[in-house]
Amino acid sequence: MKQPILISFGVVLAFLGGASVSGQAPSRATTSASGKWSPPRTPDGKPDMQGIWDFRTVTPMERPAEFANKAVLTPEEAAAYEKQVVAGRNADANRDRETSRGTINGTQVTADVALAYNDFWWDRGTKVANLRTSLIVDPPDGRIPALTPQAEKRLAELEKHRERLAEGPEDRPVGERCIMGFNSGPPWAPGGYNMNVQIVQASGNVVLMNEMVHNARIVPMDGRPFSNARQWAGVSRGRWEGDTLVVETKNFSHETSLRGSGPNLHLIEKFTLSGPDTLVYEFTVSDPTTWTKPWTAQIPMRKTEDRIFEYACHEGNYGMMGVLRGARQIEKESATGTRP
């Protein structure tokens, strides 16, 4: 699950030319006579967002049916919802629960892997984000827009490949293959654990370091054009709009970790300091080949003194070897009639 980090920013920072702009000390946050908070600044005058940020929350991406027309909860409703969600997710209390997934080649399969870890290993959030009933703030109904017919066909084909016995690693999701983390993005979205990100600002670049799959996304800030090379995490370019850091990403190579999106995903991320220890992370995704219209989510992030830990994934991807060996064994037993 989590292991003490075995990698560092040493190589990245050597490439960038240092962890802070011009190697100078940043300014401190200030509060004006009117009580208005002003963020600390780097030597070049930009808001200093450096540090480790935590984006855990119990608020779901989409608004639950029980809150159909309710965008914001009262504090009392939020407390009750937090208690309900935390209890419902407790892996120790719910260990005896099994949910059928149907059959593969006549073999019954259940979803008990979801409870394979006891509750100690999960690191989900416990609080509602800004009292909202969904992380999605647009559309106003808090729901992801409908898929296009093209996307429905593409995802149905992917599901068909994943339900059969795996013929190769390509039949399994990118998260299972340790290529992309299930919450590492881009964009980031709360998941089960490893929900920390480290931001490093250097002259001409910003680095966004995910704890999940420990991917360091280097974002040039010098106005250079996008490269045509497609990458798993896309190609990112950054700019400042006032005190907001804006990161634009496109040219993804294939499927991404975001709700069925494909290589045509166009992502805009915005980072705004809202207090000494709070940062508002907002992202807007558009992909006319996947959704009927763009949608936007907003996640409040909290500064943490915790360290970044390495996510070792399959630690050599032994899990994938087990999946493929198991598939070949089932095929062999089915062919010889020895399958129980």
Image (spheres, rainbow, N blue to C red):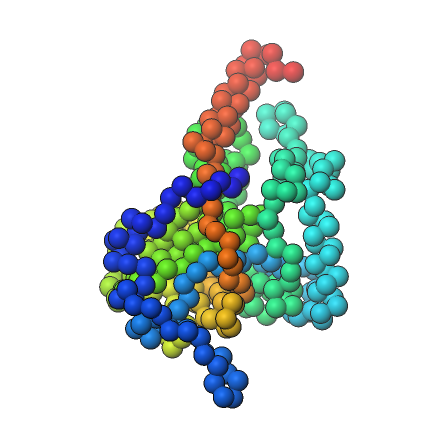
User: How many numbered discs sit on the rendered protein?
Assistant: 0
Residue placed at 63% from the left, 25% from the top?
107
Say which of 21 and 272 sits in front: 21
Choose top left, top right, bottom left or bottom right for residue 267.
bottom left
Using the rendered image of the protein, determine whether residue 207 is visible from the camera's viewpoint: yes
Asked whether 293 or 272 is in front, the reply is: 272
Quadrant housing the C terminus: top right
Residue 232 coordinates in the image, percent (x, y): 37, 47
Against 123, residue 269 (above or below) is: below
> Foreground: 198 or 327?
198
* Residue 274 spot, x, y in % from top left: 50, 73
> Of residues 156 and 224, which is closer to you in this image?
224
Residue 87 in the image: state x and y as whole percent.
73, 50
What residue occupies the far bottom of the structure in this picture?
34
- Report the side of 253 relative to 259 (left or right): left
Q: Is residue 231 left or right of residue 64?
A: left
Residue at x-position 34% and y-position 63%: 201
Whether residue 265 appears in this view of the structure is no
Q: Is residue 252 left or right of residue 159?
A: left
Identify which residue is drawn at 51% across, 41% down.
Answer: 2
Where does residue 281 sit, x and y in percent of width and height?
48, 65
Q: Residue at x 36, y 70 (%)?
A: 26
